[in-house]
Image (cartoon, grey):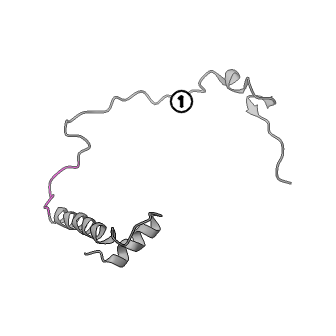
Amino acid sequence: MTVDAATVRRIAHLARIAVDDAEVPHLQGELNAILAFVEQLQEVNVDGVEPMTSVMPMEMKKRADVVNDGGIADKIVGNAPVTDDHFFLVPKVVE
């Protein structure tokens, strides 16, 4: 896949980037180089290769998934002008 000058201008327009006509050939070459590299990467055989998130194998630290109310409901609604049973009360805005 190659990018022509019209496509460069269209991408710049969509990205809201001002591009002078003198910059278009340079950007066209840059985009074509990026796309060529992506095409080259797609040719690599990755069968049997496990996906990885880091070069060093590590496990995430996990905490127990415990449901609680936080125990601070009074502090949370303490600064609210109007509350009712730990709920914020707000003026009605829709009839």
Give the camera-side residue of 92 and 1. 1
Q: Give the residues drawn in magenta, as a range.
A: 44-51
Write down the residue under mark 1: 67
Give the camera-side residue of 79 and 64. 79
- Identify the amino acid type marked 1: Val
Indicate left or right for 42 with 72 as reference: left
Residue 31 placement: quadrant: bottom left
* Residue at (73, 23) in percent of width and height: 78
Give the camera-side residue of 81 and 9. 9
Residue 34 placement: quadrant: bottom left
x, y percent for residue 24: 33, 71
Residue that protrudes farthest toward the front in the picture = 22
* Residue at (20, 67) in percent of width and height: 36
Q: Is residue 71 above or below residue 83?
A: above
What main secondary structure does the magenta stretch of the protein show? Answer: loop
Residue that protrudes farthest toward the right in the picture = 95
Q: Is residue 52 above or below residue 11?
A: above
State the SS at label 1: loop
* Residue at (33, 67) in percent of width and height: 23
Indicate left or right for 87 with 62 as reference: right
Residue 28 placement: quadrant: bottom left
Quadrant position of the N terminus in the picture = bottom left
* Residue at (44, 63) in percent of width and height: 17
Indicate left or right for 26 with 19 as reference: left
Magenta stretch: includes residue 33: no
x, y percent for residue 83: 79, 30
Quadrant position of the C terminus in the picture = bottom right
